[in-house]
Image (tube, rainbow, N blue to C red):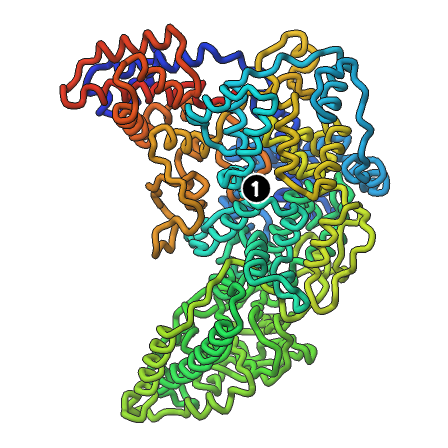
Amino acid sequence: MTFCRTILGCLPPRFLAGDRSVWAFVVAAAAMTASAAPAATPANTPPAASESTAAQIEFFEAKVRPVLVEHCYQCHSVKSQKLKGSLYVDGRDGLLHGGDSGPAIVPGDADKSVLIEAIRYKNEDTAMPPKQKLPAPVIADLEAWVKMGAPWPNEAKLSVAKAGPDYAKLKAEHWAYQPIRKPAVPAVKDAAWTRGDLDRFTLSSMEAKGIRPVADADRLTLVRRVYFDLLGLPPTPEQIDRFLSDQSPNAFEKLVDELLASPHFGERWGRNWLDVARFAESLTLRGFVLKDAWKYRDYVIEQFNSDRPFDQFMQEQIAGDLIANDPKSTADLATRRRQMNGTTFLALGNNNLEEQDKAGLRMDVVDEQLDTFGKAFLGQTIGCARCHDHKFDPVPTKDYYALAGIFRNAKTLEHSNVSKWLEVPLPGDEAAAKLVKEHEAAVAALQDRIKITKSAVAKAARGIDPDKLPAGGKAKVIAVADLPGLVIDDEQARKVGEWKVTTHTGSYIGEGYRQDLNGDKGQKTLTFQPEALNAGKYEVRLAYTPGPNRATNVPVTIFSADGDKTIHINQQEVPPIDGRFISLGQYNFEKNGAGFVLVSNEGTRGFVIADAAQFIPVAELAAIESAVKPASPHADPSAEDGPAVELKKLEAELKALQAKAPKSETIVSIVEESKIEDTRVHVRGNVHNLGAEVPRGYLSAVEVKGVPTPPADQSGRRELALWLAARDNPLPARVTANRIWHWLMGQGIVRTVDNFGTTGEMPSDLRLLDYLSTQFVEQGWSVKKLVRQIVLSRTYQLDFRHDANAAAVDPENRLNWRSNRQRLDGESLRDAMLTVSGQLDKTMGGPTYKAGTNADYNYKYTDARRSIYIPQFRNSMPEMIEAFDAADPSMVSGRRNISTVAPQALFMLNHPFVLSQSEAAADRLLKEGPTDAAARADLAYRWVLGRLPTDKERAVVLQYVQGFHGAAKTAERDSWTPIFHGLFASLDFRYVN
């Protein structure tokens, strides 16, 4: 009762205002249905510790070791020329032992760890790294690592890693890299028990251990199990009765075929894949909404319903745009549009669009895509090789950059101060496409004219005399958008050393300008690198504010396709162009090449200033100069023939033109870069520290014959897709077959479903996995056929009851001697409640968030459609689904965590959604059900739990309903509401046997 009183205090006031027997029934009903539940066994528990360790080690390798290598090893490792502070950070023991300041880390407590205090820059004397504070996300990763106990590969693995893993041995011996060979079907002693070859594999493993499978599940248990597994919905009493009354030998087979043909199959199984694809409709940053992402969700649902070959599905997600736009393709328009939709897969990453190091951001996007590609299709942690050769799997750094080169030639973002995802037009008919292209060209031309005219207006308003600063030196601030060409403000420049932001002169571009504090000469640079520059010749200009205390010999180096050239600028002199800019000359640049302007303070005396760099196409210079001739200080910019009047006309013309824009349907996707090139190794993962160039290619550990190398004029994604789907690639078929088994049976043959490397778990039965993999491929990569084969096996149809003898031999049920009792995920729980209440809206597809939604913060979804259609917003995850272990939409999640925590029970007791569905179910019962109380109790149980109540349960319900005292008007409804509430809160509702 102490527990009950504690929970009672959490109930909403409306449940506390009246008869507390409401609460009494909820607790009683939950307790009764729970009494039938078997004791939890290891198979029902959260992931094994070994797997958790593997995940932590992966976090360490991806997020922690690269930081230590790049920022700490030079002074604090066994290879340091001079060890500082007596501290080693290249091993866990060194961190625990510490240096002159004591232990560097306290596992589990970041606040007490000297290392964390140092990187937080709390104390200037101990701040590390000494040159510059680490970025906030990196600090957060190190804090998280310490809080999780500072996991580190064990000494055995570490010693191998230091010496370098034997890749040839791993490739030759590790099971995942071996070719899939169809195993011989094993002989079994009890052949009569089996219903097919699959059962022979599972039974032979059991017989080898001296155990037997439990009895078959009863038909009532089986029908509820298969409905949830295939559709994610509960069977209605009518559907249950129809199956139970069908006594034909193939009754279950007919039911399975019916469910596989249901459109709800794609909704259930599409949700499984969306977890893997880290699907979301928004970004964490500012809650940006990806308005077309829902089209990928619908594409996935349709894929599983139509059961197109899974190898084709994989290829479309890697290179659907290239397949759709192949000039040799004879596919119809609908097929081409579907193929384009598939490639949205690569654009769904949760990227930091505000990152100002755009070269670094570009590589971070590639890294996220490569990590997703590796785990989703290959079960490989490829991302660990970004900074160094993989410590445990045969993935050398050159393989990482061979693959990264392919993805790097696919453009995912349009870079600016805050970068933007790409909205790519879907294929349409030729006439419509021509209209769209013509309109876009007209808009672009008009926008160029407006930009030039805006510059003229700004200049006329300022009345700048190029020979001197404006009177009193009080020139107006200029917005970057008001300047012609491509302008990179000092905010966007990459900084080395400390540069102070100032607005002292009042004359600057953007938010201010930078000065070097007249110190640390030779140690500070600013790099202005244009990310969206088209190939061509440009005039390059630098903006600075002059003054008598400025340096007279500031070295400015221009890196272009013509080579590099250094110019020295006297910043005591007024810039000759508008009193703002000085020309650095005209240079050729390649599209998105490595060109940039570097301002240094080396060899200078006095303050070094940098405000902005400007790149103006030489072809546009004449038009710009004629439009922005020096204006008289007394000129009227608003005169009839002035630039201000012309600007208004042009802006009105643009508005009218945009209003007439032909509608072009778009998707979130990627496009090929205009310049295709191989990628150089980024030493220690740093995009600004380049090593040798690596030809684009594939994983060397996986031998696939006959796949062409990436062509010179395309990224190579199409060839990568062919390599992925090749019959002799052993990884994709194994990974997918294992996931299908996991989604049906509750645990994979390989329980680390996203990691088939050496840090993942070994298969419980490699023969079974290879049998399923070969069946999958031989049956045309058909998901439905493999699902059907598994579901029709006797292994799938076993009861969930416990067996002491089998449990003693195989406590985790790795040999499948019984069914695993599974808790429903949040989506199925919500959909089941909506089904019971009669409110489920089965409308399929389309956008589901409110029109005009631009940010996802605090978004509330109130529709009654299936849970897969709830907007998947990263900052506003649905409460119910999140409470029941939703997949992280920023990570590949082939297997969800399954927890059993108090907030789940409290949610079912207190949340308004559960209460409203209980009331709606009571209304439905009174409207559609029988008038007899006992019959109503029977129907309520059948709706919610799929079975009749026991005699004791029925008696409790009747006693409660008949003894209910409430307002006469709502007495019946109020008496049945807690009945449904109690059933929804019960374990029997949350779990499927």
Name the outermost residue toward the left: 968
Name the outermost residue toward the front: 248
Q: Is residue 312 left or right of residue 965?
A: right
Residue at image coords 56%, 36% = 260
Residue at image coords 48%, 35% = 886
Q: Is residue 119 left or right of residue 965?
A: right
Residue at image coords 35%, 20% = 940
- Disc 1 crowd rating (10 Å Cα; few below 14, some 14-19, many 20+) is many
Q: What x and y, as percent, mark residue 802? A: 59, 11
* Residue 210 quadrant: top right
Vertical relation: 393 (above or below) 514: above
Mark 1, residue position: 273
Examine the rendering and report whether any part of residue 903 can be seen: yes
For this rendering, which residue is in front, 486 or 263?
Answer: 263
Q: What x and y, as percent, mark residue 870? A: 41, 43
Q: Dividing the image into 4 quarters, which one contains the N terminus? A: top left
For this rendering, which residue is in front, 529 or 731?
Answer: 731
Vertical relation: 144 (above or below) 713: above
Q: Is residue 117 left or right of residue 449?
A: right
For this rendering, which residue is in front, 591 or 946?
Answer: 946
**The disc labelled 1 sits on which kind of residue?**
Trp
Residue at image coords 50%, 23% = 243
Q: What x and y, as percent, mark residue 124? A: 52, 48
